Image (spheres, rainbow, N blue to C red):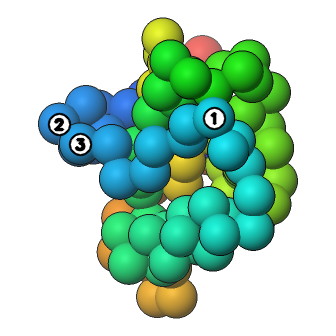
């Protein structure tokens, strides 16, 4: 599960990306999941676009594909969403999930 700071970082990285996967009227099937897995293995962070012919809701499509690929959803915006799955070893360095401890006043 990604923290808010990590999602912001991934959104900034994903802003300039072009969609790698397009979901159309065939919706999410095994071939699309295999293609998304290959793209995640190669890039760690991918942009997925829902075409007009897709009958799935954007959030439903993002959840289904992320669950099938064991990835995290970094952003859902319009008909586009970002998926993130760290590679081994990770190329994208995420900020730490913990909040820094506040200094105590004396």
Q: Single out the residue that lies furthest toward the top.
A: 78
Total marks drawn? 3
Return the residue nearer the eye: 55 or 71: 55
The residue singled out by tag 3 in the image is 18
Q: Which quadrant of the view contains residue 71? A: bottom right
Q: Position of residue 9 (x, y in %)?
A: 38, 38
Q: Quadrant of residue 16?
A: top left
Find residue 85 and name its label: none
Note whether 55 is above or below 19 in the view shown. Answer: above
Q: Is residue 71 above or below residue 73?
A: below
On screen, residue 71 above or below 11: below
Q: Residue furthest bottom?
A: 88
- Assess disc 2: are there few (<14), some (14-19) or many (≥20) residues with their C-alpha within 10 Å of its C-alpha: few
Toward which corner of the image does residue 29 lie, by quadrant?
A: bottom right
Q: Residue 103: percent from the left, percent from the top?
A: 56, 28
The residue tagged with tag 3: helix, strand or loop? loop
Left/right placement of residue 36 relative to residue 14 reads right
Q: Is residue 73 above or below residue 78?
A: below
Give the label on residue 16, or none: 2
The residue beneath circle 1 is 25
* Camera sees residue 7: no
**Dot 3, how many residues are within 10 Å of its Cα: few (below 14), some (14-19), or many (20+)?**
few
In percent of the image, x 55 and y 64: which residue is there? Answer: 36
Q: Which quadrant: the C terminus?
A: top right
Contact, mark 3 vs mark 2 (Cβ under 8 Å): no
């Amino acid at each position: 599960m990604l923290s808010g700071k990590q999602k912001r970082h991934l959104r900034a990285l994903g802003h300039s990306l072009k969609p790698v996967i397009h979901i159309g009227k065939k919706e999410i099937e095994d071939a699309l999941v295999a293609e998304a897995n290959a793209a995640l293995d190669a890039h760690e962070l991918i942009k997925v676009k829902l075409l007009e012919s897709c009958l799935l809701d954007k959030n439903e499509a993002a959840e289904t594909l992320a669950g099938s690929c064991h990835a995290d959803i970094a952003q859902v915006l319009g008909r586009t969403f970002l998926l993130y799955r760290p590679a081994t070893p990770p190329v994208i360095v995420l900020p730490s999930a913990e909040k820094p401890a506040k200094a105590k006043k004396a």
